Every structure is written in structure tokens, then in C-alpha cells.
Image (spheres, grey):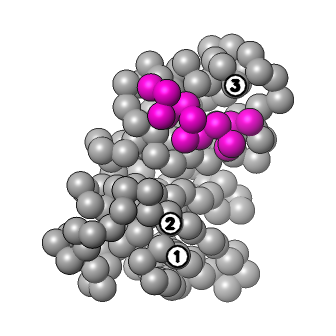
Amino acid sequence: LLTACLSIEMTLSRSFKSERALLSMGNMLSSLNVNVKAMVVSSDQRFAFVTTEYYGTLNIIDLKDLEYPVVVSSLALKVSGYTFKIKALTLSKDEKTLYVSNSRDLEIIDITDVESPKLISFTKSEIFQEGDLNEIPSNFKTSLALDENTKTLFIGGLGLQVYDVSNLKRP
């Protein structure tokens, strides 16, 4: 519970101006009874996209009423596993697409309808295999960067992976 709240404190504190709203969001996330691993908030601060560490679930949270945030939908993700836990999320500029990575794999999700997110594609990297990386520390960091102009997605962490995402179904 405390780990979940602390791990996203910086993201939340940048997104929410009042301490009361921050506390409400932290309490709501705690009620999910999972360890939050990654989170991104829409630019209008209306929705939070939150992934859980072990269960590989995306929760989309409506922040319209910051006192009482509500999970509007959940989606089981493919980019999860014991070694390769979900590490990073990023939104497209138009905020209709969510990119999810665990340092190894990439999942692209259509979030045009936040109440019914849909898998667009799943790409499993051939570079790294589950058993090959047993020595990865639990605090290992991953980051995603999306260049909207060139339609290129960069996954940094276990080296650098570069994806052409001009065709979301076949990156």
C-alpha cells in the first residue's frame, strides 16, 4: 500500500494541485489492492492510466471528481511476467493510443473509448528471453519516448529498442 503510493507520488504531485485530491487518488489506488508500477495522466488531467506490477492489468481511472476517482475500465495486458514486469507507459500526442512496455515487449492499446480499451498489437522482442535475464535488479528502470513526427518509439532499458509505429498493427 505504502509502496504503491510512494512509487507514483512524483507523477501524482505534478498532476494534482491539492493535497486532498492527491490523497483521494492514493486511497483509490490502494483500494485496488495491487502494487502500482507505472502511470501516466492525460494532458487534461481527466484520466489516469495505471498498470499493476504482477497482475499485468491496465486500469483507466476517471479523475473528473478528484475527491472520488473511479476506475472506468480494466484490461488484462500481455506485457507482463515475473522477470519482465510492466515498467513504462506513454501516450500518443492525440491521447488515443497508449504504449506499454516491460523493457522487452511492446503492447499498443487503442484508448479512444476509455470505457472499452482495445488491443491494437503486441510485439514480443526476440532479443531478450525470460530465463536469460535472471540477474536484473528489481529497481531496474525503463523509459519510453515517442517521436510523433517520425512515428518512432524508443524503449530504453535493456539496451535500446527502436520501433517504427507508423502502422500500429505491425510495429
Q: Would residue 8 be counted in the magenta stretch?
A: yes
Q: Secondary structure at mark 3?
A: helix
- Going by the image, does 21 lie left or right of 86? right
Tag 1: Cα neighbours inside 10 Å, few (<14), some, or many (≥20)? some
Instruction: Name the quarter where the N terminus is drawn.
Output: top left
Q: Amino acid at mark 2?
A: Thr
Residue 5's tag is none
Residue under label 3: 22
Q: Answer with mark 3 or mark 2, whichever residue precedes in sequence.
A: 3
Number of numbered callouts drawn:
3
Q: Under tag 1, what secondary structure?
A: strand
User: What is the magenta range?
Assistant: 1-13
Q: Which circle's residue, 2 or 1, is located before the other in the chain?
A: 2
Prevalent SS, magenta region:
helix
Quarter of the image where one finds residue 140? bottom left
CA–CA distance between discs 2 and 1? 6 Å
Which residue is label 2 attached to?
Answer: 142
Q: Are marks 3 and 1 in contact (CB under 8 Å)?
A: no
